Image (cartoon, helix red, strand yellow):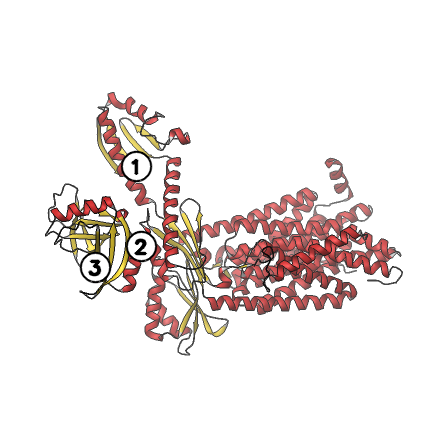
Amino acid sequence: MLYFSKLRILFITLFSVLFILIASSNLFKFDDNFFDKKINLGLDLQGGSYLLLEIDNEPVIEQKLQNLTTTIRNYFKEKNIKINNIKIDNQNIFFNVTDNDKQSVLDVFQDENSDLNPYYPRFKSHQLEIEDTGLNFKVNFSRQGLIRLKTSSQDQAIEIVRRRVDEVGTNEPNILKRGNNRILVELPGLDDPMRIKSLLGKTANLTFRFVTNDDNDRFGVEKLKFENGLEEATVSKRIIISGENLLDAQPKMDTQANQTIVSFTLDRVGAKRFGKATSTGIGKQLAIVLDGKIISAPVVRDTIASGSGQISGGFTFQTATDLALLLRSGALPAPLEIIEERTVGPDLGQDSINAGMIALAIGFMLVIIFMFVKYKIFGLITNVTLIVNLFILLGVLTLFEATLTLPGIAGIILTVGMAVDANVLIFERIKEELKDETNNILAFDGGYTKSRTAILDANITTLLAAIILFFMGSGPVKGFAVTLGVGIFTTLFSVYFIARLFTSIYVSRNKDKEKLI
Amino acid sequence: MIAFNKFYNHFNLLSSVLILVSLLLLIFKGLNFGIDFKGGTLIELRASDSKINVSSLRDRFNQMELGDVSVKKFGNDTDFLVKFENKDNKKNIIEEIKANLDKSFGNNYDFRRVENVGPKVSAELLKSGVIAISLSLALMLIYIWIRFEWQFSLGAILALFHDVIVTLGIFSLFSLEINLSIIAAVLTIVGYSMNDTVVIFDRVRENLRKYSDIKIFELTNISINETLSRTIITSATTLLALLAIYFFGGEILKGFSLAMILGVFFGTYSSIYIANTVLVRLRVSQKTVLREEEDKK
């Protein structure tokens, strides 16, 4: 165990130097790309905001079912099958049929190529599930159908979230999918997420609809509140144009009325429809509805054929800017809810870094002094190894550009405390061997060999804990698992290669000395 | 040589009492879950005006109808930690609070940290925490089973249970907060305690092969003594590192390092007084080790 070939010594030296260099790139700037890496600081250390958003898919499902009832009705009408009492209740479509038609209805739903099963050819599973009790049918989305629906609304939502966050212009945001109905947004350096939170909290579903007094409107009507929550108006459900028709929206200052407005440009289809509606609806009130609330309802005075217009509604410059931003980035397919938020201010982050570094320095010093007092020359060897170990650990973290969190720093400190364990196991074993063995070299060799299984067992158990923590933990705790886990490997390397190399050099030079350890 | 085995019975009794008391505490008093597991909102606030203190803050927050509010000093005199249920899960709660505080204190304060965990997320976090701890215990059990004989496996796992339950019992007794980092600490304790047990077990097994005529009661004592200096030194260095985190690592890591300090203490104790006594009570002998080895061949 004590013999090292020249090649091995060279390899150990090169390996250590390489990682020390990589670790030091956190302090100095290297021209070389390979070395110019840095450990990422977690949000708890650099300050920033972590937001977990959940997509509320209920309205989407509701809407899809609504569309589906129309599809079903039309589909069977074409086939001359009479469907009665079709209605939606609690996310199920209910209807009943006559005895003669029952089998043909079931056939249609089970047919793999029918238009009611758009998924079958692609996913080999049905989008819809049908249950029958007598002549009553219950139709709802199958598991697969729901998953497809959720992932598709997640795909749309993440795109919109990304656009909105980018528009606000924070540095290096991190936007990721979580599960099939969540989106994780990490915003480093942002200590006041209020604006982004309010931007993400809005669906931004914009529609232009006429105010009507006719309760028998062909499209149905609904009562909507104004933004201020006081007044109310009855609005037709017929949508003239919606947010999808917008090409651009910008906040502007209307110098005549001396107020801030949002001016918008419509696409070709939107411009055409807007022109037609404004020409037939002169004198009527056109309500501008955002997320179920009326922003304003100006009276149409002229035909607007240019495809551009403006929204006024007592905006401040900030609210106008935000509305324009929301309109530009598009509507979310479903409302988002912030279900978890963690925000750390930059000065607290810096305080945490300082406290972590002081704790690391003090912990390190205490361990080093302890080991030196206890083992003298071998304590010194352990200490040198410990320092190299620390650098290699930082080097590995840097190489993989891992994220360092406050618990992660605790993990490093803990690694320092536990790293000496392997060396202690070896040294104590050597001491025991020396009781019956007069040959120093043999005793050292025996000490290394016989302590090996205990050291491996001990480290594997800690590694198992770290692995579980890595997969089950979240955020900062994950950082702890990373440093603890990586620390085990660097510790084993430094104990078995670096410390052993020093030990072997020292022992072979002093092989005849008594009471070596 | 220290006669650890003289006290096997005494400490077994003590541990049984400790476990029983801890379980009773856990059942009847329960754990003080932080917002990670209970849901709610946490605000760390730094004041630059002496008018802002625990009672004036408590007054302000109580007026806002946020459910249960707790206001505590956090580290030094100007830092406060405010926690509340946010029962109705109000959306713009932080803005409302800021507006309200501005009225009374102007801008002589600063939110250093804001955490808001919804009820769904907290339930999930609790579930994954419980799964993580159970999974780690199961994995340790399997690992020891593969490496050692079943008697050893049982001893190690009982020792782990003891450490986890007693540490949580102490957290319950003093109403210390359980948050995500405590779960990390408990998992690390599991790893550390296992580590300690394995080192002694390794020696017990080696000695079982070496001395056929010594009874397990004596043999465990010999093994404990042979590994004692290592046990002391490693616990000492680990504790030194942990004490450094506890005293200098800032308020956020206090709970974590305290749990770890307790864990290292109990982990070391249980390796000696629980893991080994299981071997004694199961009358492990040289035959156990040799038979198992033949089976494996």
**In the structure shown, which secondary structural element does the residue marked by tag 1 occupy?**
strand
Q: Earlier in the sequence, mark 1 or mark 2?
A: 1
Q: Is residue B264 left or right of residue B27?
A: right
Disc 2 target residue: A326
Disc 3 target residue: A312
Q: Residues within 10 Å of mark 3 (few under 14, many from 20)?
A: some
Question: Amino acid under label 2?
Answer: Leu
The chain identifier of the residue carrying mark 1 reads A
Q: Are marks 3 and 2 in contact (CB under 8 Å)?
A: no
Question: Amino acid under label 1?
Answer: Asn
Q: Report the quarter where the C terminus of chain A lies.
A: bottom right
Above-or-below relation of B195 to A89? below
Q: Is residue A94 left or right of residue B209?
A: left
Q: Earlier in the sequence, mark 3 or mark 1?
A: 1
Q: Quadrant of residue B35?
A: bottom left
Disc 1 target residue: A92
Question: Amino acid under label 3?
Answer: Ser
The chain identifier of the residue carrying mark 3 reads A
**Front residue (pair B287, A81):** A81
